[in-house]
Image: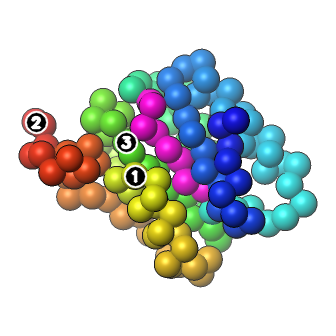
Amino acid sequence: MPVNEWSDSIFILDLADEPAFSEEMDAINARLDEADTPTPHVVVNLAAVRFVSSSNLAQLLRLRKRVLSASRQIHLAAVQDSVWSVLLTTGLDLVFTFSPDVATALASVQMSGSSASSAPRRPATSPTSQRTNQPPRH
């Protein structure tokens, strides 16, 4: 299942390339619509995503808006270089908060609590090169 309820207040969304990406985004939105509980923090695991379309970016932005409007956090984790370059080109590297992996994103959400700032944090280098201690590719 693409949506994992890691805790009562944190969901992990494991995404893959299309067509699964759109289906999984629809699944989390449906799950949030059905929920009788407050909107959770969301960690989006992009480790298996190698390509994103403009529609995928729009879906991520809609999810971000929904989560932030509930004063919760959204983290994009394990972003591949091919996706990172699209996020840089579109300026979305300034909008989302990034973590090198899911465990770091979970720790960040837990440490900051629900009242944390929604200001995006971005890595100094691409998430993949930061994760492997390799210099960023240019």
Position of residue 114 in the picture relative to residue 26 (left or right): left
Q: Mark 2 points at which residue?
A: 138
Q: Distance between the residues labelled 3 and 1?
A: 8 Å
The one nearer the camera, 84 or 128, is 128
Q: Name the residue under label 1.
A: 101
Q: Is the magenta stretch mostly helix, strand or loop?
A: strand
CA gap, disc 1 and disc 2: 22 Å
The answer to which of marks 1 and 2 sits earlier in the sequence is: 1
Callout 1 crowding tier (Cα within 10 Å): few <14, some 14–19, many ≥20: many
Q: Reading the chain from its start, which is encountered first: label 3 or label 1?
A: 3
From which residue to which does the magenta span run? 42-49
Amino acid of disc 3: Val
Q: Which of 49 and 85 is in front in this view?
A: 49
Is residue 13 magenta-colored? no
Nearer to the camera, 114 or 88: 114
Question: Hey, which quadrant is residue 123 in on the image?
Answer: bottom left
Residue 79 - label? 3
Between residue 96 and residue 35, name the one nearer to us.
35
At label 2, which amino acid type do we have? Answer: His
User: What amino acid is found at the position of numbered circle 1 in the picture?
Assistant: Asp
- Residue 79, above or below 103: above
